[in-house]
Amino acid sequence: MIKNIIFDIGNVLAQFRWQKLFKELGFEGEVFEQVADATVRGPWWPEYDRSRLSDPEIWEHCCALAPHLGPQVMAVFENIEGICREYDYARAWIYGLKAAGYNIYLLSNFGHTSFEIARQKFSFMDLVDGQVISYEVEEIKPDRAIFSALEKKYGILPEESVFLDDSMKNVKAAKSYGYHGIFFENQRLAIKKLEGMGVFAISVSQDDDRRFMKAALTQAKKAAALGEVPIGCVIVKDGQIIARGYNQRNKKHSTLGHAEISAIGKASKVLGDWRLEDCTLYVTLEPCSMCAGAMIQARLGRAVMGAMNPKAGCAGSVMNMLQMDGFNHKVHVTRNVLGEACAALMSDFFAKMRDKR
Ligand SMILES: [Zn+2]
């Protein structure tokens, strides 16, 4: 079963648009060709990605390949920001795959400087579970070493991972290392190939997730107003909130007074069914063992959480009960939706409690 999706960046998540950059710099005809041969098409470009040499050393080698075009070659490096542009679909695609429970990693050949500049503009960096970029390990694809670095860093097993790259050479190499491989031509075909491997993204929008988490925060504030730990929850089916709940442990004198248990009970009443397969539960704090257990019992489709709970959370912190191999049901999980706002509500509450004492 595929658990990990590993993306190349260039021409997969972001366009490697060196030709456009060259045109923007005014290169034409022979100049265009010679600067390309001295830079992106030349022998030193892989070394730039590998970053064992310093930038000035690379510049010198590249300039030496076209001595009469020094300023043009340098202009490429000075304008390296323009060599890469994120595709419009990148963030939404990764968001949908993350929502479906896959781990997302980046494995890309990039020089140190160009990646540091590019990552500021990539909107998907906060969604991915990790990355190995060639300059970090001074190794480039398709070499085994850079794949090994990714496996070691994140405990990835190649047989549980699919690698997407626009270079056939890299895909073939990945397959020989035991990975599933997809030669990337365009997103539409890549989605088809992923589906052929049983990998389906969930169609969710980040805006919807934020909107429903806000509704859960409203519930959490109700708890706070009663002096209860501010945790709130809503359950959504077909784009509609069907149940709400907030923590009332003290008021009800009951361990069962958690927001999620309350909302799950109401949702089942509304639907006339204990199964919540097509529902998404939004909760401001990572669920405890009891609530995570209830979500599995309810066959919940998806759980979206705000802040994590390092000391008691059972959706990734203490353990990840929602996605354990031994159980007959797994819940799709999205973490850190309005996480800061959810965490702030908690810390404000406890700060006020301390002041009172
Ligand atoms: Zn709970």
Image (spheres, helix red, strand yellow):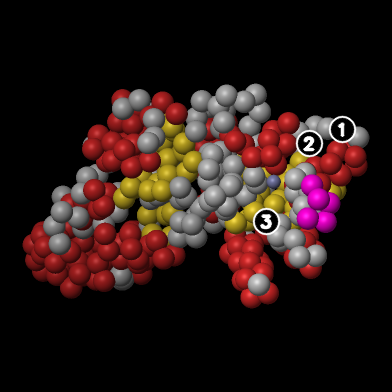
Q: Is residue 54 left or right of residue 145?
A: left
Q: Which mark is residue 187?
A: none
Mark 3 Cα-neighbour bin, 10 Å: few <14, some 14–19, many ≥20 = many
Cβ–Cβ under 8 Å for marks 2 and 1: yes
Residue that mark 3 sits on? 284
Q: Quadrant of residue 36?
A: bottom left
Q: Nearer the viewer, residue 202 or 33?
A: 202
CA gap, disc 3 to disc 1?
Answer: 25 Å
Residue that mark 1 sits on? 273
Cβ–Cβ under 8 Å for marks 2 and 3: no
Please state the extent of the stretch shown in magenta in the rendering. Answer: 250-254
Judged by depth in the image, the label closer to the viewer, 2 or 3, is 3
The first of marks 3 and 1 along the sequence is 1
Residue 350 horizontal/vertical position (percent): 63, 67
Residue plotted at (33% across, 42% down): 153
Residue that mark 2 sits on? 276
